[in-house]
């Protein structure tokens, strides 16, 4: 899982003919994800911050401070249950 701060609006990823040409953040980071896959790591969708640079507002910071921990909790609760399932399958229990 990668968490990145992009000093660009989210629309740069979602509008045709914008810089990232409809590729999402994890697609842009594909090479890094593939290196991690090669060494045996699983892909977990990342969390990405947008427009956190010079024009960021206190409201935006507070929103992200609330969203990010909730996202991590959701992702890792789901991921932990997958690990338990894999261990059970391996051990046959």
Image: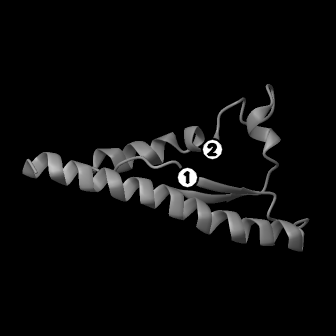
Identify the residue at horizontal 63%, vertical 44% (top origin): 25
Q: Residue 29 placed where, x, y %?
A: 54, 45
Image disc number at residue 38? none
Q: How is the image coloured?
A: one colour
Going by the picture, which residue comes out furthest to the left? 92
**Quadrant in the rendering for residue 55:** bottom right
Going by the picture, which residue comes out furthest to the front? 93
Tell how many labels.
Answer: 2
Q: Residue 1 placed where, x, y %?
A: 48, 55
Report the mark closest to the observer, 2 or 1: 1
* Rendered view: 68 above or below 31: below
Instruction: Please rate how many residues cluster around mark 2, counting C-alpha atoms within 10 Å: few if below 14, some from 14 to 19, many from 20.
Output: some
54 lies left or right of 80: right
Q: Residue 91 placed where, x, y %?
A: 8, 52
Chain-order first, disc 2 or disc 1: 2
Q: Residue 75 placed where, x, y %?
A: 49, 56
In the structure shown, which secondary structural element does the residue marked by tag 1 occupy? loop
Identify the residue at horizontal 68%, vertical 63% (top origin): 67
Identify the residue at horizontal 81%, vertical 32% (top origin): 18
Identify the residue at horizontal 87%, vertical 69% (top origin): 59
49 lies left or right of 25: right
Instruction: Please rate how many residues cluster around mark 1, counting C-alpha atoms within 10 Å: few if below 14, some from 14 to 19, many from 20.
Output: some
* Rendered view: 75 above or below 13: below
What residue sits right under mark 2 in the picture? 25
């Amino acid at each position: 899982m990668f968490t990145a701060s992009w000093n660009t609006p989210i629309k740069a990823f979602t509008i045709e003919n914008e810089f990232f040409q409809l590729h999402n953040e994890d697609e842009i980071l594909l090479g890094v994800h593939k290196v991690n896959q090669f060494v045996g790591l699983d892909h977990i969708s990342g969390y990405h911050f947008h427009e956190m640079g010079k024009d960021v507002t206190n409201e935006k910071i507070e929103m992200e401070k609330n969203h990010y921990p909730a996202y991590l909790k959701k992702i890792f609760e789901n991921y932990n249950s997958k690990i338990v399932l894999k261990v059970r399958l391996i051990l046959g229990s």
